[in-house]
């Protein structure tokens, strides 16, 4: 007999809006039935585990396409142990689909990291690999080792993609560098998303990159020239093009509320993907942590390089991004859910499996209380964090 779980009485955030006192039926790993309104108990529920979630929200599991670490571990460590610790740290905060992001390193080191991470993709623990660096601008490198930066020669780009054995889903580069546009074309041909980021490019160059196949803005506004009225730069070029999904780090440090509102107004929730860009301190406290070969000091939850003081990723988890977007930024819950789930799932080409609460998709979901605090997380039909409101047998 298949395992059957019924979530009853919650506010369900579905693709067509919020539905009060809905019911979600899960069989094994997938969503079997969705009821948008209160209803009598189905006779089959007698054979199910029923969870009363009255007063709670149920939203799709979060999809993070850009995260480096968490739980005092990182994907750049090159070990399955640290990668899994990172995955499980963020999973407990609602991220049920994770893309592993690397940081600038030697091509040999990145290739080895990709090999380890590709095995976790094949096992179903990760959704793919994202290379951030080394093909980025010295002027906008942020928390990347300047001694290891290099131009995006298409042969080197191809080497990293090949090292990931079909699991590379994204690569961030600066298109103004020699080989940049050619590398964008190569990535597009290989089915890997080219992301514009850590760039000093002007408006026109970014426009050429998008025409060549770039489809992502890596943490928009950060590590790129500011939006100017005479030199609009990357921000305008990336916001204005409907082919581009823009990443945003909504932690209160990486961007002003007005910039967030601008991005949502111009791109809309269908093109905004909230990310964490988290490093190893996510889910931890203040202190010193490694970020690739560099050292980071976390103070009051803000990560900065020990040498130079540049912001070094974040300590964010996506549940905090959700809560801030709703309670501080005042965004509608369905728009926030889209930016955390549906839009990044579509970016990855996984919208048929994850990103929304629909029949046939994986039972990946997050249970939130009235204050938007996570009280339960389910992935593939199994509780990662089980809400303490069980009523059925």
Image: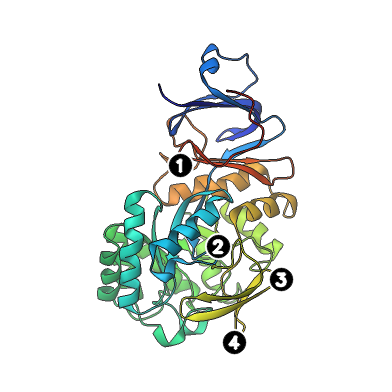
Residue denoted by label 4: 308
Where the C terminus falls, by quadrant?
A: top right
Which image quarter is the N terminus in?
top left
In three-dimensional space, the C-alpha distance between marks 4 and 1, rounded to whole angstroms, equals: 40 Å
Q: Are marks 4 and 1 in contact (CB under 8 Å)?
A: no
87 left or right of 179?
A: right
Q: Toward the viewer: 231 or 315?
A: 315
Q: In this view, does 66 lie above or below 134?
A: above
Left or right of 122, for residue 10? right
SS label for mark 4: loop
Residue situated in front as seen by the camera: 50 or 8? 50
SS for dot 2: loop
Which type of secondary structure does the marked residue at label 3 adopt? loop
Could you classify mark 3 by the number of other residues whose Cα lies within 10 Å: few (under 14), some (14-19), or many (20 or more)?
few
Residue 18 image point, x, y percent:
64, 33
Distance of mark 3 from mark 1, alpha carbons?
34 Å
Element carrying mark 1: loop
Return the x and y of residue 151 as percentages of the image width and height: 35, 81
Give percent across and percent down for residue 309. 62, 83
């Amino acid at each position: 007999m298949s395992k059957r779980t019924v979530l009853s009485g919650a506010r369900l955030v579905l693709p067509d809006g919020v539905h009060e006192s809905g019911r979600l039926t899960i069989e094994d790993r997938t969503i079997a039935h969705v009821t948008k309104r209160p209803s009598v108990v189905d006779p089959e529920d007698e054979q199910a585990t029923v969870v009363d979630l009255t007063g709670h929200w149920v939203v799709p599991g979060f999809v993070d396409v850009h995260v480096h670490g968490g739980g005092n571990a990182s994907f750049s460590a090159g070990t399955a142990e640290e990668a899994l610790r990172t995955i499980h740290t963020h999973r407990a905060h609602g991220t049920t689909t994770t893309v592993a992001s690397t940081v600038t390193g030697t091509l040999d080191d990145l290739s080895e990291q990709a090999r380890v991470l590709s095995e976790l993709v094949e096992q179903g623990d990760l959704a793919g690999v994202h290379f951030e660096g080394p093909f980025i601008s010295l002027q906008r490198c942020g928390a990347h080792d300047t001694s290891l930066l290099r131009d995006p020669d298409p042969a080197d780009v191809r080497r990293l993609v090949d090292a990931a054995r079909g699991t590379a889903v994204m690569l961030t580069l600066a298109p103004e560098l020699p080989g940049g546009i050619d590398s964008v074309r190569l990535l597009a041909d290989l089915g890997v998303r080219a992301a514009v980021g850590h760039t000093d490019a002007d408006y026109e160059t970014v426009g050429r990159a998008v025409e060549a196949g770039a489809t992502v803005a890596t943490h928009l506004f950060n590590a790129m020239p500011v939006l100017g009225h005479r030199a609009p730069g990357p921000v305008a070029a990336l916001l204005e093009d409907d082919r581009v999904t823009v990443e945003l780090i909504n932690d209160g440090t990486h961007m002003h509320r007005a910039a967030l509102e601008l991005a949502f107004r111009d791109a809309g929730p269908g093109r905004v993907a909230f990310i964490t860009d988290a490093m190893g301190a996510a889910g931890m406290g203040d202190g010193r942590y490694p970020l690739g070969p560099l050292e980071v000091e976390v103070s009051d939850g803000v990560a900065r390089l020990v040498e130079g003081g540049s912001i070094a990723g974040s300590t964010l988890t996506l549940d905090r991004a959700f809560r801030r977007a709703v309670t501080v930024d005042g965004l509608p819950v369905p728009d926030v859910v889209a930016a955390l789930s549906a839009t990044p799932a579509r970016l990855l080409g996984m919208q048929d499996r994850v990103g929304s609460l629909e029949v046939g998709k994986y039972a990946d979901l997050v249970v939130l209380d009235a204050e938007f605090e996570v009280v339960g997380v389910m992935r593939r039909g199994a509780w990662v964090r089980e809400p303490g409101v069980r009523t059925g047998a």
